[in-house]
Image: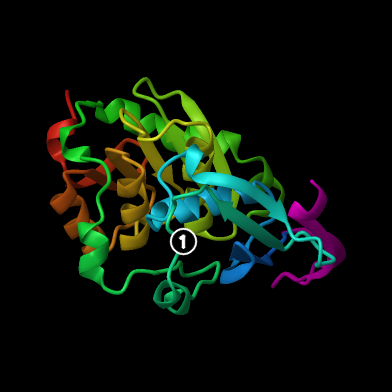
Amino acid sequence: MGRITVRRPVLRLSTSGAGGRRPDTLAVEEPLEIRVAGKPLTITMRTPGNDFDLVAGFLAAEGVIAGPDDLATMRYCADTTEQNTLDVVLAPGVTPPDDSMTRAFTTTSACGVCGKSSIEALRADRPYDVARDPLRVTPELLAALPERLREAQRVFDRTGGLHAAGLFDSDGRLLALREDVGRHNAVDKVIGWALRGGRLPLAGTVLLVSGRASFELTQKAMAAGVPVLAAVSAPSSLAVELAEDAGMTLVGFLRGETMNVYAGADRLTA
C-alpha cells in the first residue's frame, strides 16, 4: 500500500490479563499543501493517494473550476522532498481564487474547509439544478449500498481508520470509491475523479458516505450535481436545510433494512 498505511508497534491489553506487543497497521495521515500557480491556497490533512482527484474535487466544490478544461496542469512541486505539495495551473481565462478565499481556508482531516465568505454564499452556489433530476430509487436499492461500499474498502479492512465515499449509478453499481482519513477528502476525491473524466454533473447517481452527512458534504454533493446523498450516520440540521433548499434527497442512518429520509422523499419509490 506504500504510504497509504504504516506498521507501528502496539501494546495490546485486556481486562482478562492476556496481551502483549504486536505490530499494527495504521492509516497514514499527512499534510497536502495546495498551490495555485505557485501561490499557497490551503493545507489539508489527508491519506496520500488520488491527490490529483482530491485537488480537482476541492476546487470544483469551491466553485473555482467547473470541468477538466479548466485545469491546465497539476504537478507535485520539485522543491519539496515528499509528494506533499501540489501546484495547479488553471487554464487561460479561469479566475483564480482571490486573497480573501485563501485567508478563509482552514482545514483538517476531522473538519473540512469553508472557503466562502458566508453560509448564504454556499447556499447560493448551485451550478446544477439537482431538483430537476428525474432519478428514482427504491429503499431496497439504498439498503444494499452500505454493504457494497464496505466490501470495496480495502484499506479500511487493514486499518479500521478510514472514511469512504462511494458513487453508485441508478442500478446500484459502484462507479467510484475513495478512502481517506477525512470525510470531506474522500468526497473530494470522488468528485475530482468525475471532473477529470468529464463526468460532471453527476446526474442520476447516489453518493454514499461512511460517516455522518454534514452541511459541507451536502454542499459538495450539490456542487457536483448529485441528486441523492446517503449516509450511514446522522445528518446535521444545516445539511437537511440545504438539501431541502436544493431539491436533493438526503438519507441518514442507512443501516440494515432501515433508513431515515430527511429531504426529498419523493425520489423513493415502492
Query: Is residue 174 covered in magenta?
Result: no
Residue 53 x/y as whole percent: 58, 46
Asked if one can make out residue 28 in the rendered structure from this viewpoint, the answer is yes
Residue that protrudes farthest toward the top in the picture: 171
> 40 or 25, which lies in front?
40
- Identify the residue shown where x is 31% and y is 61%: 215
Left or right placement of residue 116 versus residue 107 in this view: left
Question: In the orientation shown, which residue stands out farthest toward the front?
Answer: 92
Segment tinted magenta in the rendering? 1-26
Q: Quadrant of residue 152?
A: top right
Quadrant hosting residue 140: top left
Report the coloring of the rendering. rainbow
Q: Nearer the viewer, residue 209 or 68?
A: 68
Which residue matches tag 1?
96
Instruction: Tell me if residue 162 can be seen.
Output: no
What residue is drawn where x is 69% and y is 49%?
Answer: 49
Whole-percent x and y of residue 193? 53, 39
Q: Is residue 22 magenta?
A: yes
Q: Is residue 207 left or right of residue 163?
A: left
The answer to whether 95 is drawn above or below residue 228 in the figure is below
What's the amino acid at mark 1?
Pro
Q: In screen coordinates, is 7 left or right of 90?
A: right
Please tell me which residue is depicted at 40% across the width and 24% down the height of the picture. Answer: 172
For residue 16, above or below residue 168: below
